[in-house]
Image (tube, rainbow, N blue to C red):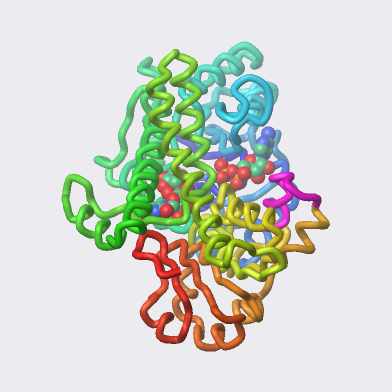
Amino acid sequence: MNIKKICCIGAGYVGGPTMAVIAQKCPLINVTVVDINTDRIAAWNSNDLSKLPVYEPDLDSIIKEARGRNLFFSTEVDNAIDAADMIFISVNTPTKTYGKGKGLAADLKYIELCARQIARVSRQDKIVVEKSTLPVRTASAIKSILDNTGNGVQFQILSNPEFLAEGTAVKDLLEPDRVLIGGDSTKEGKGAIQSLVDIYANWVPKDRILTTNVWSSELSKLTANAFLAQRVSSINAMSVICEKTGADINEVSKAIGMDSRIGPKFLESSVGFGGSCFQKDILNLVYIAKSYGLNEVADYWEQVILMNDYQKNRFSDNIVSTLYNTVSGKKITFLGWAFKKDTNDTRESAAIQVADNLLNERAYIEVYDPKVTEERIYADLEHLNSRNPEENRELLKIRQNPYQASENSHAIAVLTEWDEFKTFDWQKIYDNMKKPAFIFDGRGILDTKTLEKIGFICYQIGSGTKA
Ligand code: UDX
Ligand code: ADP
């Protein structure tokens, strides 16, 4: 099928940037991104490109080029579905918070709603592409809903997992390591796969476009994220040993990363991984393993999460014990709230857990993050349900610059690795803090030697601790 019109359901961190790049690279294809969230769509349509709902380096220039030409953002979901030859499902699949599989399995209710909507509206044959992270065999559930509730229309289901990482989404989309497309091996299935291959082939070299069966494609996505998260938990496990023994995690990382069998990426010790995918996908994997009675496999992967929880909690424990075993009424400055640099996304950010632990100890926190909004930070805390919203607003404030956020503060905690933190006027920050002035660098980005010369007492994740 020669694709002329694409509809993407879900204008989030995946749908928005992915469709922007497809539209930029395929000017002859009309791409409409729809969402039920009217505020989000309004923000995507905003003339002020700094107001786009997703912050990603270079995304604004792509939106500027393609929006209004062949890229559209709309809330008219039914019309866009009806008009499209190919529909991407890119809605959220959070971990279930209720019922069977609670806390482990992915909640597929948004996916199912989409499938039913597609079935109801469609009047001609369509290719449906699952883009969200989904448990293995979701494609067959979508197919069953479409085939049994549709208007006799033929659907082909493809799995096309997204491998973009936030903060580098545009680069990852423009120069992907690989594009993975899973589909049926029937004649129709192969035709559908080819239609999607042809779209990516507009800018991705052919040898980087892999085709597999649907289940391999779905499982590859979970496997990739589990492996990446496992590397972070592995290096974080070593960071604890380094701190006890006087070894330095950066030196260890460098030494092992030069082994070409290991490689240098994803070896940065941190206060813990976050993001919408790692935890969710591993929990999903654990759920799948358990549902097949594979308890050893489930335990193996679950340990990656337990290690990550440990890393977050020991970071806040260390702050409390260093500040003479009490942070009650003390001001602690958070530098960073996003789960990594160059994104305004905060889902599962380590900062949330660390803040919650310190607020439970009655600390007073002031946060500076260059991209995360005040509403987002309070929403993250409310989601935990640890305190009532008024209390959170009293105990935690958001500041527009680091100098204000650190005035009269007892300690600074670095939770995100934003580049700008390295170039702050640290002498000015030190002068306005309570003494002794502590820094807890949970990202290993600051030059502690220089900071110690100023007078700070420094703790850096994974290195011989002074604090
Ligand atoms: C991840 C996958 O990388 C991507 O392929 C998939 O499509 C979605 O999930 P993302 O969550 O956006 O992407 O970010 P990623 O760069 O993978 O980082 C995840 C977390 O691990 C962040 O909190 C990051 O700070 C942390 N991390 C990463 C480390 O702590 N150390 C590292 O060495 C690398
Ligand atoms: P991701 O990181 O996977 O892109 P997001 O939460 O950023 O996740 O985006 C998912 C988007 O999908 C949200 O904006 C949400 O409003 C939208 N969405 C969820 N269900 C539907 C639906 N049935 N129709 C249209 N949009 C939907």
- Where does residue 359 sit, x and y in percent of width and height? 68, 57
Residue occupying image coordinates x 44% and y 67%:
459
Q: Which quadrant of the figure has residue 233?
A: top left
Residue occupying image coordinates x 62% and y 35%:
83
- Where does residue 342 sit, x and y in percent of width and height? 50, 63
Q: Which quadrant of the figure has residue 181?
A: top left
**Rendered position, 397 above or below 452:** above
Task: For the N terminus, give its image quadrant.
Answer: top left
Question: Looking at the image, which is closer to me, 304 or 133?
Answer: 304
Residue 424 seen from this side: yes
Number of labels in the image equals 0
- Where does residue 142 sit, x and y in percent of width and height? 56, 21
Residue 174 seen from this side: no
**Which contiguous range is marked in magenta?**
377-388
Question: Looking at the image, which is closer to me, 45 or 231?
Answer: 231
**Rendered position, 104 above or below 390:** above
- Ligand 2 quadrant assignment: top right
**Rendered position, 289 above or below 460:** above
- Residue 11 appears left or right of 302: right
Residue occupying image coordinates x 49% and y 26%:
135
Q: Main secondary structure of the magenta part?
A: helix
| Extreme-front residue of the structure | 324
- Residue 464 appears left or right of 167: left
Question: Looking at the image, which is closer to me, 120 or 264?
Answer: 264
Q: Is 267 covered by the magenta stretch?
A: no
Residue occupying image coordinates x 55% and y 23%:
125
- Where does residue 347 sit, x and y in percent of width and height? 58, 49
